[in-house]
């Protein structure tokens, strides 16, 4: 028998009735993106500012004050003076400060004598999240401070200027929110669809459905369509919040990003349906979708941990995940304005993932109750 | 396309894990008759129906389909088989009309044929006043009638019903049977399972099934005569007493 649009549309229409009458599904589709974008956008800020810095200045010279001023005038540190080096260390240990700057008594004298002026920075290594950024800040402040202390007469023979492309202020929101679109789409698509076929098995309607002329591919297509529409709606919602509330720039082409969304959806909806077809029980389907959809889209897509720094095995393994490819499309669409030709590889990979997943879901869909 | 369909079940065996459900069952179902598969719960009635509908695969034996006496391919006949499962199988949140429209599209029915069928079925089942009510809020009898309506929308040539009258009040039961009798006039093969033994006498041919075996088959009156029983209740009670240790 050939594919019938009418039968597929009938399944889609029926599914749409279910969605409309199930407040949980609608709420999940519209509230979840809102909550996630607000949490990631406001609460989780990967930019570290106002790091409390305990400063012990035993030198009290012009040079030491210049060094401290350089720290103060950056937005990154909030300086609070302490009496001794021991106090500074104690503050870090008691978590009253996240870093300490200790300037020894002979700091300026050493400098004037042409020797190396030594000052010490202590960073709380137990707080893994701050170590990297803080030590980076210290590095750049050091360079700045040495120029200031030396005065304008001693200009370094060269100047190294770093300018960050696409996100000049290195605003982490600009980076996180486009990535968040991937996580939201993944959760919505896989979670909602993984339940639909399992539900038919659970309430007995599959037995009746299988005795009608409807084909597995028509059931798959019909069930995926309304969820695709719902997820695209949620995505439009996220896009509007990202642009208006958080002011994330969008440098690319909306149609390229939209096409990426659609391809990613096809892959994940098919994966959700495959889970549902195999599991036949809603609780099992839910666990499977967490394991194979939500976790990888968070951890292995490059959203939190950069793929480039993963071990070789994971570097290859993530190639199987649609989330990795869509992450590239989302970030480069938002920030770099890449066009379709520049994104050819992720698009091809995404299309392939979608085709394979759909084929698997249709193949595994059995027309018997065995 | 509109030939009469008959079905032969030959030596079919089926078991689930380690529990045998059918032991070499052979049955003949001729077109245009109402066949009753009668037996207590757990005797393998539902398994037998599912095998005949291609929903389960037999471990041994086979099912043969005939159209006007000539062998026919199951896949070709599949669209003209209608099935009403025993378990709840409708969508609780969909109304009667939404169910009918869903099945109309699954069966690819033309609008005008659908409109006529809908009118007719709603009239016979007396459900016309409830078309907007969700299936989850229908009474047991109304629910079964809706299931039957969904199956009958497409004018099937084989109608398979698994315990259509279980959990249905006496008046609705009579209505359901009346609905089925109308189908016989259209030369439809009807297969009904039931655990209500008094309903056996409504069938033109009964097949008594017990513990996965066919123990007797024939016209209800003749069968009772041969066995020397006054009713199927008596017949089964006697057999149960005889097989008890």
Image (cartoon, coloured by chain):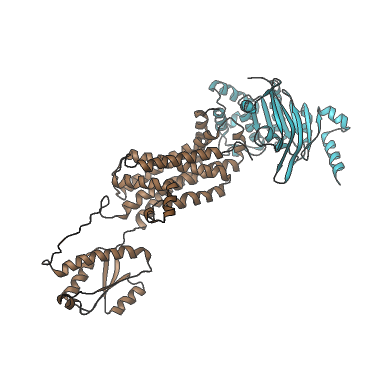
Q: Quadrant of residue B35?
A: top right
Residue B124 vertical placement versus B41 (above, below): above
Between B71 and B173, the one nearer to me in the picture: B71
- In the drawing, does residue A109 fall left or right of residue B114? left
- In the drawing, does residue A279 fall left or right of residue A241? right
Write the residue at 33% across / 52% down: A175
Q: Where residue B193 sits: x, y (%)?
A: 73, 34
Quarter of the image where the C terminus of chain A is located? top right
Residue found farthest to the right: B228
Write the residue at 30% across / 65% down: A134
Q: Quadrant of residue A104?
A: bottom left
Residue found farthest to the front: A312
Chain letter for the cyan colouring in the rendering: B
Q: Where residue A316 sits: x, y (%)?
A: 43, 50
Q: Where residue A9 sits: x, y (%)?
A: 49, 31
Chain letter for the brown colouring in the rendering: A
How many marks the image carries: the answer is 0
């Amino acid at each position: 028998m050939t594919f019938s649009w009418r039968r597929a549309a009938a399944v889609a229409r029926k599914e749409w009735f279910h969605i409309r009458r199930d407040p949980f599904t609608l709420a999940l589709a519209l509230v979840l993106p809102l909550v996630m974008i607000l949490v990631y956008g406001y609460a989780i800020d990967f930019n570290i500012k106002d790091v409390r810095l305990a400063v012990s200045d035993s030198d009290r010279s012009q040079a030491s004050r210049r060094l401290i001023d350089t720290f103060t005038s950056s937005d990154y540190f909030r300086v609070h003076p302490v009496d001794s080096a021991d106090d500074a260390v104690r503050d870090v240990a008691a978590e009253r400060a996240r870093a300490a700057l200790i300037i020894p008594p002979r700091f300026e004298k050493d400098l004037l004598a042409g020797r190396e002026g030594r000052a010490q920075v202590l960073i709380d290594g137990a707080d893994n999240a701050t170590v990297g950024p803080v030590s980076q800040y210290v590095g750049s402040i050091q360079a700045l401070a040495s120029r200031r202390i030396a005065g304008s007469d001693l200009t370094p023979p060269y100047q190294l200027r770093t300018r960050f492309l696409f996100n000049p202020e290195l605003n982490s929101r600009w980076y996180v929110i486009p990535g968040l679109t991937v996580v939201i789409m993944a959760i919505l698509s896989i979670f909602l669809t993984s339940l639909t076929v399992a539900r038919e098995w659970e309430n007995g309607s599959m037995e009746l459905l299988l005795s009608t002329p409807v084909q597995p591919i028509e059931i798959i297509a019909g069930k995926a369509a309304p969820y695709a529409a719902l997820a695209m709606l949620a995505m439009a919602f996220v896009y509007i919040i990202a642009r208006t509330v958080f002011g994330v720039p969008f440098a690319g082409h909306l149609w390229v990003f939209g096409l990426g969304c659609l391809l990613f959806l096809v892959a994940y909806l098919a994966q959700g349906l495959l889970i549902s077809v195999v599991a036949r029980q809603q609780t099992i389907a839910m666990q499977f979708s967490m394991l194979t959809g939500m976790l990888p889209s968070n951890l292995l897509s490059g959203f939190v941990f950069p793929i480039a720094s993963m071990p070789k095995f994971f570097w290859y393994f993530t190639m199987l995940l649609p989330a990795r490819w869509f992450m590239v499309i989302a970030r480069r669409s938002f920030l770099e304005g890449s066009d379709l030709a520049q994104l050819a590889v992720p698009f091809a990979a995404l299309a392939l993932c979608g085709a394979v997943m759909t084929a698997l879901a249709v193949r595994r869909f059995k027309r018997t109750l065995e | 396309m509109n030939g009469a369909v008959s079905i032969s079940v030959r030596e079919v065996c089926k078991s689930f894990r380690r529990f045998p459900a059918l032991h070499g069952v052979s049955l003949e179902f001729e077109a245009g008759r109402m066949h009753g598969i009668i037996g207590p719960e757990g005797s393998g009635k539902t398994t037998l129906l599912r095998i005949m509908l291609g929903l389960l695969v037999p471990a041994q034996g086979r099912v043969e389909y005939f159209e006007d006496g000539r062998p026919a391919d199951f896949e070709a006949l599949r669209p003209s088989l209608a099935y009403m499962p025993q378990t709840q199988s409708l969508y609780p949140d969909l109304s009667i009309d939404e169910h009918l429209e869903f099945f109309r599209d699954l069966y690819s029915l033309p609008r005008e044929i659908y409109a006529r069928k809908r009118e007719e079925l709603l009239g016979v089942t007396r459900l016309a006043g409830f078309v907007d009510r969700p299936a989850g809020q229908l009474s047991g009898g109304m629910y079964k009638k809706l299931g039957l309506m969904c199956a009958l929308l497409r004018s099937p040539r084989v109608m398979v019903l698994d315990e259509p009258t279980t959990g249905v009040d006496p008046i609705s039961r009579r209505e359901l049977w009346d609905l089925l009798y109308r189908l016989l006039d259209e030369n439809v093969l009807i297969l009904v399972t039931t655990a209500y033994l008094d309903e056996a006498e409504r069938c033109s041919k009964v097949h008594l099934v017990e513990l996965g075996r066919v123990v007797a088959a024939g016209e209800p009156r003749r069968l009772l005569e041969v066995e020397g029983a006054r009713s199927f209740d008596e017949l089964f009670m006697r057999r149960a007493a005889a097989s008890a240790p």
